[in-house]
Amino acid sequence: MSMVTSQINTFLFQVILLAAFCFACITFVLYMRERKSSELVGTLLLHNIACIQYCLLKTVYNFFAISSIMAPSWISNESFTMNIVTNTVVSGAICSQQSIYLAGMLIAIDRVILLAFPLFYKFHAVSKRLAQAGTVFCLVLFSTVLTFDCILPLFGHTTFIFIVVDLVYYLEKIFNWLLCVEVVLHVIFCVFYWRFSKKQSNLIKARRTRQVNHIVFCQLLSLTVFCATPQLVTLVDQTFFHSNVNDILRSGYVFTLFAIHVLITSAFTFLKLFKQPSAVNVASNPVGMMGGSRIVVSN
């Protein structure tokens, strides 16, 4: 990749990140504002927070890179503290990307359980439990990276940095496979949704349920096009073409594609939550029974 092309890609990447960050923040505000009037889907909230965190860390990294504050930190004579900040931001951004994959997978599991076992889902607060489990995992992951990559090196324990490098590397390999699992879970949800929609189940007619279901459909399409397809191309290339295509993907475009995925899902979530319910069903009581009519607002 030439210098000009690299700069254009970096600028485009930053614009996409800022747009995704704005949509994600507004979505978070809207979602928290509605939490008292509608059922809170914890996994969707976790995904939204992961998107905000990813965009924020990547924006900080790009700001440093563009302003040459940490360019190129791996071979320059920058201060030791700045190198620690660099490593922490880079590792944190990678972990945030994996958190988005994890949250997307939990949303798919949430929807599958809702459609397959609605009573179990409601009684055991499955969405809340899944969100809590995902939050604990992400907190442990970020705490580990922060401790080994930032806190301990400040006290002179620099050997732990290599532990974090290995940890992030293997986690990236594992989550690449979890990306495939996430796509499969989304497909399973689509099958369940199609079966229940044919039965005209009231379960899928609730406003919040329909909103989240549509968001999952959007995530499946975006995830397949911008995340799974590049991973598949990379796998095929490594097997048959000796990483010639992979070099192009890894030169920066793969991160831009993932940022586009975050932007699309954040913007679509914002649009679904921003739209207010417009349908008002009026059900009239039979003459002579309770007198008059009643208005039922569909939620």
Image (spheres, grey):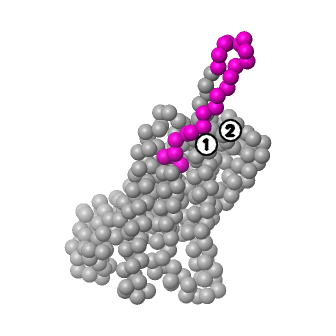
> Under tag 2, what secondary structure?
helix
Is residue 111 toward the left or the right of residue 91 in the image?
right
Structural crowding at the residue carrying mark 2, measured as other residues with C-alpha within 10 Å and reported as few (<14), some (14–19) or many (≥20):
some
Q: Which residues are magenta?
A: 272-293
Residue 175, image quadrant: bottom right
Q: Position of residue 228 (x, y in %)?
A: 60, 68
Which mark, residue 203? 2
| Amino acid at pointer 2 | Leu
Tag 1 residue: 209
Q: Is residue 49 above or below residue 82?
A: above
- Residue at the spot x=25%, y=70% of the render? 82
Is residue 187 toward the left or the right of residue 103 in the image?
right
284 or 57, which is in the foreground? 284
Would you say residue 170 is visible in this rendering?
Answer: no
Residue 67, image quadrant: bottom left
Q: What whole-number distance in Å separates the C-alpha atoms at marks 2 and 1?
A: 8 Å
- Residue at the spot x=71%, y=43% of the render? 116
Q: Position of residue 108 (x, y in %)?
A: 61, 52
Marks 2 & 1, CB-CB < 8 Å contact: yes
